């Protein structure tokens, strides 16, 4: 509740609007009463609008803070792992030892997908973008699991959560294998979450992929650092779709579609495209000059962040992980990776970039790591979607567990007023 009010004068009338305070972040003005006064607010992109109340994730972009259920992302990345973070996002607290063991065992026991689902892939071209395939097969999950679709029932929601968390890596790896024309690899329940994903990606019936613990830990951190990021475009899409009563598989598919946009989930893919455009270390100075020229359309991808104004707290973790991966793989001489490391050095030392806070962000480092591991650029956003599924589901679950209304944004209409159809 609140004892504060804002006053708005409209057409000579003063309207009082309640002001609410959260545990963190700016106060919000409750404008719901404006509809009764015949006016709406106008906020393209919802840049100043709190569309929901949430207890899951908090971002302070000015100070470089990202909290999941109150825990800083740096501490979670250092001491936790992806499945523990999944439990935390879903339930609000860290699991006990027994809860953790049960949660992991349940996820492991749900990693296979219905065999009939494998036939869906044959309807796609082999050269289709993996995100196009992912949208289709995730949405199709609702055709297989209609036994537990009463989402007013907490048990049904929990079953859906386990199915999505467990099956997304399997589906992601299947998208990759299908693009190569290789047979799908079954998950193995003796491997942890990240190890299992690497196995399904890179093993073949002819031989198992040798899993390096440094690579598996790096993969797990990539999952963690992309798990949730508050009310972004794809999360808001999932919430809006869920507000209609749509099932969570359809809602997650809508989130994947929103994430596919290059302005959202395609950033680490854009980093590698940029590195390929630069092509050689000898060209770096030319491209840096282009980046500094405000009249040149070229932009350095993977530097700065729309939300974080000083630094991206996830990037610090990713930078350390990147160094570990390049070291263990001995890929410091990869031409594109050498370009990337030189760009990183310039961004951290050049006053132009320092003044404008154009620091390397999480997309910059994750793109380098994924390339070094051997994952193709077309799969980068699929891995992002796989990681973000838990965040999407946690927000959907939070919404449907409480009192919610179907989303219905308003508009500022600037078209024709009523006019008559011309007589013939």
Image (cartoon, helix red, strand yellow):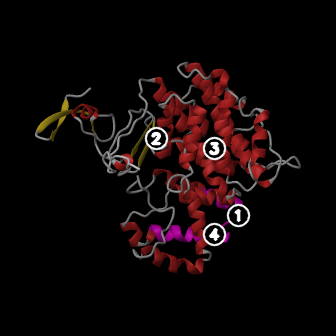
Looking at marks 4 and 1 on the same chain, the residue that comes earlier in the sequence is marked by 1
Relative to residue 34, is residue 281 depicted above or below?
below
Which mark sits nearer the N-terminus, 3 or 2? 3
Q: Is residue 40 left or right of residue 115?
A: left
- The location of residue 14, given as percent across then percent down, is 13, 36
Question: Is 410 inside the magenta-drawn segment?
Answer: no
Q: Residue at x 46, y 67 (%)?
A: 348
Q: Pointer 1 and pointer 3: residues touching (CB < 8 Å)?
A: no
Residue 161 image position (x, y, % from top left): 60, 30
The residue tagged with tag 4: helix, strand or loop? helix
Q: Which quadrant holds residue 282? A: bottom right
| Image-based side of 13 in relation to 80, left or right | left
Spatial CA span between label 1 and label 3: 35 Å
Of mark 2 and mark 1, the one earlier in the sequence is: 2
Q: Which residue is mark 2?
A: 236
Number of the front mark, 1 or 3:
3
Return the residue at label 3.
Answer: 135
Q: CA distance from mark 3 to mark 2?
A: 17 Å
Q: Which residues are magenta?
A: 322-348
Query: 28 or 262: which is nearer to us?
Result: 262
Is residue 78 in view?
no
Residue identified by numbered label 1: 330
Task: Say which label, 4 or 2, has the lower sequence index.
Answer: 2
Distance CA(mark 2)–CA(mark 1)? 41 Å
Label 1 vs 3, first from the N-terminus: 3
Q: Nearer the viewer, mark 4 or mark 1?
A: 4
- Which residue matches tag 4? 336
């Amino acid at each position: 509740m609140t004892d504060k009010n804002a006053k708005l004068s409209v057409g000579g009338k003063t309207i009082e609007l309640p002001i609410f305070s959260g545990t963190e972040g700016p106060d919000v003005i409750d404008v719901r009463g404006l509809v009764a006064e015949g006016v709406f607010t106008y906020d393209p992109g919802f840049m100043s609008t709190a569309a929901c109340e949430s207890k899951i994730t908090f971002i302070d972009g000015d100070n470089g803070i990202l909290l999941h259920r109150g825990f800083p992302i740096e501490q979670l990345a250092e001491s936790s792992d992806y499945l523990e973070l999944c439990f935390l996002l879903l339930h609000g607290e860290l699991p006990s030892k027994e809860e953790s063991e049960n949660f992991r065992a349940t996820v492991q026991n749900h990693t296979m997908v219905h065999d009939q689902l494998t036939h869906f892939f044959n309807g796609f071209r082999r050269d289709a973008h993996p995100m196009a395939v992912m949208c289709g097969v995730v949405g199709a999950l609702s055709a297989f699991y209609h036994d537990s679709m009463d989402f007013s029932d907490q048990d049904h929601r929990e079953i859906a959560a386990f199915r999505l968390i467990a099956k997304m890596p399997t589906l992601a790896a299947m998208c990759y294998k299908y693009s190569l024309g290789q047979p799908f690899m079954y998950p193995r329940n003796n491997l942890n979450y990240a190890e299992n994903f690497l196995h399904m990606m890179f093993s073949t019936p002819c031989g198992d992929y040798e899993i390096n613990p440094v690579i598996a830990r790096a993969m797990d951190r990539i999952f963690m650092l992309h798990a949730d990021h508050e009310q972004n475009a794809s999360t808001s899409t999932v919430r809006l779709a869920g507000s209609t009563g749509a099932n969570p598989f359809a809602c997650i598919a809508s989130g994947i579609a929103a994430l596919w946009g290059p302005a959202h989930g395609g950033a680490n893919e854009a980093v590698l495209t940029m590195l390929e455009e630069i092509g050689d270390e000898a060209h770096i100075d030319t491209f840096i000059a282009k980046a500094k020229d405000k009249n040149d359309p070229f932009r350095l991808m993977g530097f700065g962040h729309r939300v974080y104004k000083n630094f991206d707290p996830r990037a610090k973790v990713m930078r350390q992980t990147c160094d570990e991966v390049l070291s263990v793989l001995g890929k410091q001489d990869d031409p594109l990776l050498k370009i990337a490391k030189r760009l990183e050095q310039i961004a951290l030392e050049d006053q132009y970039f320092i003044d404008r806070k154009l620091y390397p962000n999480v997309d910059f480092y994750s793109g380098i790591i994924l390339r070094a591991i051997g994952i193709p650029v077309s799969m980068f956003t699929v891995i992002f979607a796989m990681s973000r599924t838990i965040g999407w589901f946690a927000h959907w679950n939070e919404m449907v567990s409480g009192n919610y209304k179907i989303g219905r944004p308003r508009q500022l209409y600037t078209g024709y007023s009523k006019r008559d159809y011309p007589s013939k």
